[in-house]
Image (tube, rainbow, N blue to C red):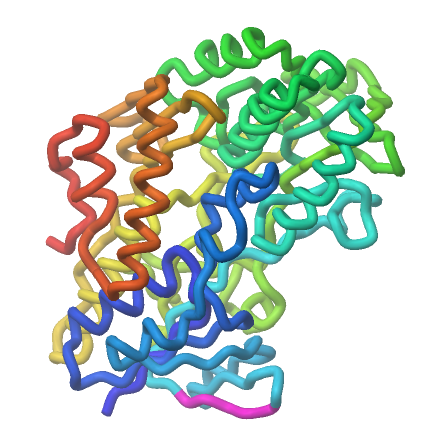
Amino acid sequence: MTHIVIIGAGLGGMAGAYELRDTLGKEARITVINERDSYQFVPSNPWIGVGWRKRPDTSFPAAPYLAKKKIDFIAQRVDRIDPAANRVQLADGQTVDYDYLVIATGPKLSFDEVPGAGPHGGHTQSVCTLDHAETSYADYQKLLQNPGPVIVGAMPGASCFGPAYEYAFILETALRRAKLRDRVPMTYVSSEPYIGHLGLGGVGDSKSMLESELRNRHIKWITNAKVTKVEAGKMFVDEVNDQGVLVKQHELPFVHSMMLPAFKGVEAVAAVEGLCNPRGFVLVDKHQRSPKYPNIYSAGVCVAIPPVEQTPVPTGTPKTGYMIESMWTAICHNIQADLTGGEPEAVGTWNALCLADMGDTGAAFLAVPQIPPRNVTWFAKGKWVHWAKIGFEKYFIYKMKNGSSEPFYEKYILKMIGMNRLKESPKAE
Protein backbone atom coordinates (compact mmCIF):
# COMPACT_ATOMS: atom_id res chain seq x y z
CA MET A 1 0.00 0.00 0.00
CA THR A 2 1.31 3.44 -0.94
CA HIS A 3 2.43 5.39 2.11
CA ILE A 4 2.20 9.19 2.08
CA VAL A 5 3.85 11.04 4.94
CA ILE A 6 2.94 14.64 5.73
CA ILE A 7 5.25 16.69 7.94
CA GLY A 8 3.18 19.34 9.69
CA ALA A 9 -0.35 19.53 11.06
CA GLY A 10 -1.04 23.22 10.80
CA LEU A 11 -3.47 25.24 8.71
CA GLY A 12 -2.46 23.38 5.55
CA GLY A 13 -1.14 20.03 6.78
CA MET A 14 -4.24 18.79 8.52
CA ALA A 15 -6.68 20.03 5.88
CA GLY A 16 -4.38 18.59 3.23
CA ALA A 17 -4.40 15.19 4.90
CA TYR A 18 -8.20 15.17 4.75
CA GLU A 19 -8.14 16.14 1.07
CA LEU A 20 -5.59 13.44 0.29
CA ARG A 21 -7.79 10.85 1.97
CA ASP A 22 -10.87 11.95 0.00
CA THR A 23 -8.91 12.11 -3.27
CA LEU A 24 -7.09 8.77 -2.97
CA GLY A 25 -9.66 6.77 -1.05
CA LYS A 26 -8.82 3.84 1.20
CA GLU A 27 -6.02 2.47 -0.95
CA ALA A 28 -3.36 4.80 0.45
CA ARG A 29 -1.87 4.90 3.93
CA ILE A 30 -1.48 8.45 5.22
CA THR A 31 0.60 9.51 8.22
CA VAL A 32 0.82 13.01 9.64
CA ILE A 33 3.90 13.86 11.72
CA ASN A 34 3.89 16.98 13.86
CA GLU A 35 6.15 18.14 16.68
CA ARG A 36 3.09 19.00 18.82
CA ASP A 37 0.17 16.73 19.60
CA SER A 38 -2.40 19.43 18.86
CA TYR A 39 -3.87 21.37 15.98
CA GLN A 40 -3.65 25.13 16.51
CA PHE A 41 -5.61 27.72 14.55
CA VAL A 42 -2.83 30.28 14.09
CA PRO A 43 -5.00 33.14 12.68
CA SER A 44 -6.58 33.49 16.14
CA ASN A 45 -3.27 34.21 17.87
CA PRO A 46 -3.61 38.04 17.84
CA TRP A 47 -6.80 37.58 19.88
CA ILE A 48 -4.95 35.23 22.25
CA GLY A 49 -2.41 38.02 22.77
CA VAL A 50 -4.99 40.30 24.43
CA GLY A 51 -6.99 37.58 26.16
CA TRP A 52 -9.96 37.54 23.76
CA ARG A 53 -9.39 33.82 23.18
CA LYS A 54 -7.96 31.03 25.30
CA ARG A 55 -6.07 27.90 24.24
CA PRO A 56 -9.13 25.58 24.30
CA ASP A 57 -10.95 27.97 21.94
CA THR A 58 -8.42 27.58 19.12
CA SER A 59 -6.60 24.30 19.73
CA PHE A 60 -7.51 20.63 20.08
CA PRO A 61 -5.76 17.21 20.01
CA ALA A 62 -5.04 16.20 16.42
CA ALA A 63 -4.89 12.40 16.72
CA PRO A 64 -8.54 11.53 17.41
CA TYR A 65 -9.86 13.70 14.59
CA LEU A 66 -7.36 12.40 12.06
CA ALA A 67 -8.15 8.85 13.19
CA LYS A 68 -11.78 9.34 12.13
CA LYS A 69 -10.48 9.61 8.56
CA LYS A 70 -8.16 6.60 8.99
CA ILE A 71 -5.10 8.86 9.07
CA ASP A 72 -2.21 7.95 11.38
CA PHE A 73 -0.63 10.60 13.58
CA ILE A 74 2.80 10.80 15.24
CA ALA A 75 3.54 13.62 17.68
CA GLN A 76 7.30 13.93 17.18
CA ARG A 77 9.73 16.39 15.67
CA VAL A 78 11.37 15.30 12.42
CA ASP A 79 15.15 15.56 12.84
CA ARG A 80 16.33 14.20 9.49
CA ILE A 81 15.02 13.51 6.01
CA ASP A 82 16.82 10.89 3.91
CA PRO A 83 15.42 11.21 0.37
CA ALA A 84 17.73 8.49 -0.98
CA ALA A 85 16.17 5.95 1.40
CA ASN A 86 12.69 7.57 1.35
CA ARG A 87 12.81 7.81 5.13
CA VAL A 88 12.43 10.36 7.90
CA GLN A 89 14.03 10.10 11.31
CA LEU A 90 12.21 11.42 14.36
CA ALA A 91 13.49 13.04 17.54
CA ASP A 92 12.92 9.85 19.57
CA GLY A 93 15.06 7.82 17.13
CA GLN A 94 12.31 5.99 15.28
CA THR A 95 12.19 6.08 11.50
CA VAL A 96 9.24 6.25 9.11
CA ASP A 97 9.49 5.15 5.48
CA TYR A 98 7.45 6.84 2.77
CA ASP A 99 6.56 6.54 -0.88
CA TYR A 100 5.60 10.20 -1.09
CA LEU A 101 6.57 12.98 1.30
CA VAL A 102 4.66 16.26 1.64
CA ILE A 103 6.47 18.98 3.56
CA ALA A 104 4.10 21.40 5.30
CA THR A 105 6.20 22.34 8.31
CA GLY A 106 5.65 26.06 8.33
CA PRO A 107 8.70 28.23 9.06
CA LYS A 108 11.52 28.53 11.51
CA LEU A 109 11.15 31.86 13.36
CA SER A 110 14.47 33.67 12.97
CA PHE A 111 14.49 35.90 16.03
CA ASP A 112 18.25 35.37 16.22
CA GLU A 113 18.77 37.62 13.19
CA VAL A 114 18.10 40.67 15.38
CA PRO A 115 20.01 40.72 18.70
CA GLY A 116 17.64 40.92 21.65
CA ALA A 117 14.52 39.95 19.68
CA GLY A 118 12.05 37.24 20.56
CA PRO A 119 10.08 36.02 23.57
CA HIS A 120 12.66 33.50 24.79
CA GLY A 121 15.77 35.28 25.98
CA GLY A 122 14.85 38.48 24.13
CA HIS A 123 12.69 41.51 24.78
CA THR A 124 9.95 41.38 22.11
CA GLN A 125 6.81 39.31 21.88
CA SER A 126 5.32 37.26 19.03
CA VAL A 127 1.95 35.89 17.93
CA CYS A 128 3.41 33.39 15.47
CA THR A 129 2.61 30.41 17.69
CA LEU A 130 0.03 29.75 20.39
CA ASP A 131 2.75 29.50 23.04
CA HIS A 132 4.17 32.84 21.95
CA ALA A 133 0.74 34.47 21.95
CA GLU A 134 0.16 33.29 25.52
CA THR A 135 3.52 34.72 26.55
CA SER A 136 2.58 37.96 24.81
CA TYR A 137 -0.69 38.02 26.76
CA ALA A 138 1.25 37.75 30.02
CA ASP A 139 3.35 40.73 28.91
CA TYR A 140 0.17 42.60 27.94
CA GLN A 141 -1.09 42.09 31.48
CA LYS A 142 2.05 43.86 32.73
CA LEU A 143 1.29 46.71 30.31
CA LEU A 144 -2.15 47.12 31.87
CA GLN A 145 -0.52 47.45 35.28
CA ASN A 146 2.21 49.79 34.05
CA PRO A 147 1.01 51.66 30.92
CA GLY A 148 3.66 53.05 28.61
CA PRO A 149 4.90 53.06 24.99
CA VAL A 150 4.11 50.14 22.68
CA ILE A 151 5.86 49.08 19.48
CA VAL A 152 4.26 46.66 17.01
CA GLY A 153 5.49 45.63 13.58
CA ALA A 154 7.81 43.41 11.57
CA MET A 155 11.55 42.80 11.50
CA PRO A 156 13.80 42.99 8.40
CA GLY A 157 13.14 40.05 6.07
CA ALA A 158 9.64 39.44 7.43
CA SER A 159 7.09 38.12 4.96
CA CYS A 160 3.96 37.98 7.10
CA PHE A 161 2.60 41.46 7.82
CA GLY A 162 -1.13 40.91 8.26
CA PRO A 163 -0.87 39.68 11.88
CA ALA A 164 1.26 42.71 12.77
CA TYR A 165 -1.45 45.11 11.58
CA GLU A 166 -4.09 42.95 13.23
CA TYR A 167 -2.31 42.92 16.57
CA ALA A 168 -1.70 46.68 16.48
CA PHE A 169 -5.38 47.42 15.90
CA ILE A 170 -6.66 44.73 18.27
CA LEU A 171 -4.32 45.94 21.02
CA GLU A 172 -5.42 49.54 20.43
CA THR A 173 -9.07 48.48 20.75
CA ALA A 174 -8.35 46.49 23.91
CA LEU A 175 -6.57 49.48 25.48
CA ARG A 176 -9.48 51.79 24.66
CA ARG A 177 -11.89 49.35 26.28
CA ALA A 178 -9.62 49.27 29.35
CA LYS A 179 -9.67 53.11 29.44
CA LEU A 180 -5.87 53.14 29.16
CA ARG A 181 -5.34 54.18 25.54
CA ASP A 182 -4.46 57.76 26.49
CA ARG A 183 -1.52 56.48 28.53
CA VAL A 184 -0.04 54.24 25.81
CA PRO A 185 1.74 55.88 22.84
CA MET A 186 1.83 53.39 19.94
CA THR A 187 4.25 53.10 17.00
CA TYR A 188 4.07 50.68 14.06
CA VAL A 189 7.61 49.80 12.90
CA SER A 190 7.95 47.78 9.70
CA SER A 191 10.42 46.73 7.04
CA GLU A 192 7.72 47.47 4.44
CA PRO A 193 8.60 50.39 2.14
CA TYR A 194 5.21 51.94 2.90
CA ILE A 195 2.12 51.24 4.96
CA GLY A 196 -0.08 48.67 3.26
CA HIS A 197 2.67 47.10 1.17
CA LEU A 198 2.00 43.78 2.92
CA GLY A 199 4.85 42.04 1.08
CA LEU A 200 2.64 42.19 -2.02
CA GLY A 201 3.49 45.58 -3.50
CA GLY A 202 0.20 46.82 -2.06
CA VAL A 203 -3.29 45.60 -2.90
CA GLY A 204 -5.63 48.16 -4.39
CA ASP A 205 -6.01 51.08 -2.00
CA SER A 206 -4.35 49.30 0.93
CA LYS A 207 -1.81 52.09 1.44
CA SER A 208 -4.22 54.97 1.95
CA MET A 209 -6.82 52.88 3.79
CA LEU A 210 -4.37 51.49 6.34
CA GLU A 211 -2.62 54.85 6.74
CA SER A 212 -6.02 56.40 7.45
CA GLU A 213 -6.81 53.72 10.01
CA LEU A 214 -3.48 54.27 11.77
CA ARG A 215 -4.04 58.03 11.85
CA ASN A 216 -7.57 57.67 13.17
CA ARG A 217 -6.24 55.52 16.00
CA HIS A 218 -3.27 57.82 16.72
CA ILE A 219 -0.69 55.17 15.87
CA LYS A 220 2.56 56.62 14.49
CA TRP A 221 4.60 54.60 12.01
CA ILE A 222 8.12 54.12 10.68
CA THR A 223 8.54 52.24 7.40
CA ASN A 224 11.71 51.24 5.55
CA ALA A 225 12.72 50.35 9.09
CA LYS A 226 15.60 48.05 9.90
CA VAL A 227 15.56 46.99 13.54
CA THR A 228 19.24 46.51 14.43
CA LYS A 229 18.95 45.41 18.06
CA VAL A 230 16.61 45.36 21.02
CA GLU A 231 17.46 45.98 24.65
CA ALA A 232 15.19 45.83 27.69
CA GLY A 233 12.70 48.62 27.11
CA LYS A 234 14.47 50.07 24.06
CA MET A 235 14.46 49.30 20.32
CA PHE A 236 17.12 50.57 17.90
CA VAL A 237 15.86 51.25 14.39
CA ASP A 238 17.64 52.46 11.25
CA GLU A 239 15.25 54.24 8.88
CA VAL A 240 16.36 54.33 5.24
CA ASN A 241 15.05 56.08 2.14
CA ASP A 242 13.90 54.49 -1.11
CA GLN A 243 17.52 54.07 -2.21
CA GLY A 244 18.39 52.24 1.00
CA VAL A 245 20.43 55.16 2.38
CA LEU A 246 20.25 55.73 6.13
CA VAL A 247 18.25 58.87 6.90
CA LYS A 248 17.56 58.56 10.63
CA GLN A 249 18.39 56.40 13.62
CA HIS A 250 15.73 55.89 16.26
CA GLU A 251 15.98 54.76 19.87
CA LEU A 252 12.40 53.90 20.74
CA PRO A 253 11.35 53.19 24.33
CA PHE A 254 8.70 50.56 24.97
CA VAL A 255 6.92 48.76 27.76
CA HIS A 256 5.40 46.15 25.43
CA SER A 257 6.45 45.18 21.91
CA MET A 258 5.22 42.55 19.45
CA MET A 259 7.47 42.22 16.40
CA LEU A 260 7.07 39.53 13.76
CA PRO A 261 10.41 37.93 12.78
CA ALA A 262 11.83 36.90 9.44
CA PHE A 263 11.21 33.28 8.47
CA LYS A 264 13.58 30.51 7.40
CA GLY A 265 13.14 26.83 6.66
CA VAL A 266 13.23 24.39 9.57
CA GLU A 267 16.56 22.65 10.12
CA ALA A 268 15.65 19.12 9.04
CA VAL A 269 14.25 20.38 5.74
CA ALA A 270 16.95 22.97 5.04
CA ALA A 271 19.66 20.32 5.57
CA VAL A 272 18.56 18.19 2.59
CA GLU A 273 20.94 18.79 -0.30
CA GLY A 274 19.27 20.36 -3.31
CA LEU A 275 15.83 20.57 -1.72
CA CYS A 276 15.81 24.21 -0.60
CA ASN A 277 16.99 27.72 -1.41
CA PRO A 278 19.64 29.40 0.78
CA ARG A 279 16.99 30.47 3.32
CA GLY A 280 15.83 26.88 3.71
CA PHE A 281 12.54 27.20 1.82
CA VAL A 282 11.53 24.24 -0.34
CA LEU A 283 12.02 24.68 -4.09
CA VAL A 284 9.02 23.42 -6.06
CA ASP A 285 7.89 23.41 -9.68
CA LYS A 286 4.44 24.57 -10.78
CA HIS A 287 3.03 21.20 -9.66
CA GLN A 288 4.29 21.73 -6.06
CA ARG A 289 6.92 19.02 -6.59
CA SER A 290 10.63 19.15 -5.81
CA PRO A 291 12.64 19.39 -9.05
CA LYS A 292 15.34 17.14 -7.54
CA TYR A 293 13.18 14.65 -5.63
CA PRO A 294 10.03 13.88 -7.64
CA ASN A 295 8.29 12.06 -4.78
CA ILE A 296 8.61 15.07 -2.46
CA TYR A 297 5.97 17.78 -2.56
CA SER A 298 5.56 20.89 -0.45
CA ALA A 299 2.85 23.41 0.45
CA GLY A 300 2.45 26.43 2.67
CA VAL A 301 4.80 28.90 4.30
CA CYS A 302 7.79 26.56 3.87
CA VAL A 303 7.62 26.86 0.04
CA ALA A 304 10.13 29.12 -1.72
CA ILE A 305 8.48 32.10 -3.42
CA PRO A 306 10.59 35.05 -4.61
CA PRO A 307 9.83 38.54 -3.28
CA VAL A 308 7.27 40.50 -5.27
CA GLU A 309 9.83 43.28 -5.67
CA GLN A 310 13.13 44.44 -4.28
CA THR A 311 12.63 46.76 -1.32
CA PRO A 312 15.13 49.01 0.52
CA VAL A 313 14.81 46.80 3.61
CA PRO A 314 14.28 43.14 2.67
CA THR A 315 10.69 41.86 2.72
CA GLY A 316 9.32 38.47 1.73
CA THR A 317 6.14 37.34 0.04
CA PRO A 318 3.34 36.05 2.29
CA LYS A 319 1.54 32.75 1.78
CA THR A 320 -2.13 33.07 2.65
CA GLY A 321 -4.65 30.32 3.38
CA TYR A 322 -6.30 30.58 -0.03
CA MET A 323 -2.97 30.00 -1.75
CA ILE A 324 -2.12 27.10 0.56
CA GLU A 325 -5.49 25.48 -0.13
CA SER A 326 -4.85 25.61 -3.87
CA MET A 327 -1.34 24.18 -3.41
CA TRP A 328 -2.81 21.19 -1.56
CA THR A 329 -5.49 20.56 -4.17
CA ALA A 330 -2.78 20.46 -6.83
CA ILE A 331 -0.66 18.06 -4.72
CA CYS A 332 -3.57 15.69 -4.18
CA HIS A 333 -4.41 15.49 -7.87
CA ASN A 334 -0.76 15.15 -8.90
CA ILE A 335 -0.07 12.28 -6.50
CA GLN A 336 -3.25 10.61 -7.75
CA ALA A 337 -2.09 11.04 -11.35
CA ASP A 338 1.31 9.56 -10.53
CA LEU A 339 -0.25 6.56 -8.81
CA THR A 340 -2.44 5.84 -11.83
CA GLY A 341 0.38 6.07 -14.36
CA GLY A 342 -0.26 9.63 -15.47
CA GLU A 343 1.81 12.77 -15.33
CA PRO A 344 1.27 15.54 -12.77
CA GLU A 345 -0.70 18.31 -14.47
CA ALA A 346 -2.53 20.16 -11.69
CA VAL A 347 -1.28 23.65 -10.92
CA GLY A 348 -2.17 25.69 -7.87
CA THR A 349 -3.41 29.22 -8.42
CA TRP A 350 -1.36 31.41 -6.15
CA ASN A 351 -3.98 33.97 -5.20
CA ALA A 352 -4.00 35.99 -1.98
CA LEU A 353 -7.09 36.39 0.18
CA CYS A 354 -6.96 37.80 3.70
CA LEU A 355 -9.43 38.81 6.39
CA ALA A 356 -7.72 41.03 8.97
CA ASP A 357 -9.48 41.87 12.21
CA MET A 358 -9.02 45.36 13.65
CA GLY A 359 -10.69 44.82 16.98
CA ASP A 360 -13.99 46.52 16.22
CA THR A 361 -13.78 46.64 12.44
CA GLY A 362 -11.63 44.87 9.84
CA ALA A 363 -10.01 44.89 6.40
CA ALA A 364 -10.19 42.34 3.61
CA PHE A 365 -8.18 42.03 0.42
CA LEU A 366 -8.09 39.77 -2.62
CA ALA A 367 -5.24 39.67 -5.15
CA VAL A 368 -5.56 37.43 -8.24
CA PRO A 369 -2.84 36.44 -8.91
CA GLN A 370 -0.88 37.33 -5.81
CA ILE A 371 2.07 38.75 -7.74
CA PRO A 372 1.19 41.75 -9.97
CA PRO A 373 0.08 42.54 -12.63
CA ARG A 374 -3.29 41.18 -11.47
CA ASN A 375 -6.62 40.26 -12.95
CA VAL A 376 -8.42 41.07 -9.69
CA THR A 377 -7.41 43.65 -7.09
CA TRP A 378 -9.89 44.28 -4.28
CA PHE A 379 -9.58 45.85 -0.85
CA ALA A 380 -12.38 46.75 1.57
CA LYS A 381 -12.89 47.81 5.17
CA GLY A 382 -15.84 47.54 7.50
CA LYS A 383 -17.31 46.03 10.63
CA TRP A 384 -18.53 43.10 8.57
CA VAL A 385 -14.91 41.93 8.19
CA HIS A 386 -14.58 41.73 11.98
CA TRP A 387 -17.59 39.41 12.08
CA ALA A 388 -16.40 37.55 8.99
CA LYS A 389 -13.08 36.78 10.70
CA ILE A 390 -14.92 35.40 13.71
CA GLY A 391 -17.08 33.27 11.41
CA PHE A 392 -13.95 32.13 9.57
CA GLU A 393 -12.40 30.97 12.83
CA LYS A 394 -15.47 29.09 14.03
CA TYR A 395 -16.16 27.41 10.71
CA PHE A 396 -12.57 26.41 10.00
CA ILE A 397 -12.16 24.80 13.42
CA TYR A 398 -15.46 23.00 12.85
CA LYS A 399 -14.16 21.85 9.46
CA MET A 400 -10.95 20.47 11.01
CA LYS A 401 -12.86 18.60 13.70
CA ASN A 402 -15.18 17.04 11.13
CA GLY A 403 -12.65 15.98 8.53
CA SER A 404 -14.02 18.21 5.78
CA SER A 405 -11.93 18.64 2.63
CA GLU A 406 -14.21 21.12 0.84
CA PRO A 407 -12.49 24.13 -0.78
CA PHE A 408 -13.14 26.35 2.21
CA TYR A 409 -11.95 29.66 0.79
CA GLU A 410 -13.98 29.43 -2.41
CA LYS A 411 -17.12 27.99 -0.82
CA TYR A 412 -17.15 30.14 2.30
CA ILE A 413 -14.91 33.20 2.19
CA LEU A 414 -15.48 34.29 -1.41
CA LYS A 415 -19.24 34.04 -0.96
CA MET A 416 -18.94 35.99 2.28
CA ILE A 417 -17.26 38.91 0.54
CA GLY A 418 -19.71 38.80 -2.33
CA MET A 419 -17.38 37.33 -4.96
CA ASN A 420 -18.55 34.73 -7.45
CA ARG A 421 -16.41 31.66 -8.07
CA LEU A 422 -13.19 32.90 -9.64
CA LYS A 423 -12.43 31.86 -13.19
CA GLU A 424 -8.93 30.91 -12.03
CA SER A 425 -10.02 28.10 -9.75
CA PRO A 426 -7.58 26.40 -7.36
CA LYS A 427 -9.10 23.08 -8.43
CA ALA A 428 -7.08 20.98 -10.83
CA GLU A 429 -7.88 21.45 -14.47
Left or right of 191 on screen, residue 72: left
Q: Position of residue 429 (x, y in %)?
A: 11, 53
Left or right of 48 on screen, residue 420: left
Residue found 74% across the figure and 30% down from its top: 144
Q: Quadrant of residue 138?
A: top right
The reply to whether residue 217 is in sight is yes
Extent of the magenta region: 93-97
Query: 300 or 384, which lies in front?
Result: 384
- Above/below status of 414 relative to 345: above
Residue found 55% across the figure and 56% down from its top: 107
Query: Seen from this angle, which residue lies furthest right?
Result: 232
The reply to whether residue 278 is in sight is no
- Above/below status of 168 relative to 26: above
Q: Position of residue 266 (x, y in %)?
A: 59, 64
- Above/below status of 163 relative to 192: below
Residue found 86% across the figure and 22% down from its top: 251
In magenta segment, residue 94: yes
Query: 241 or 222, which lies in front?
Result: 222
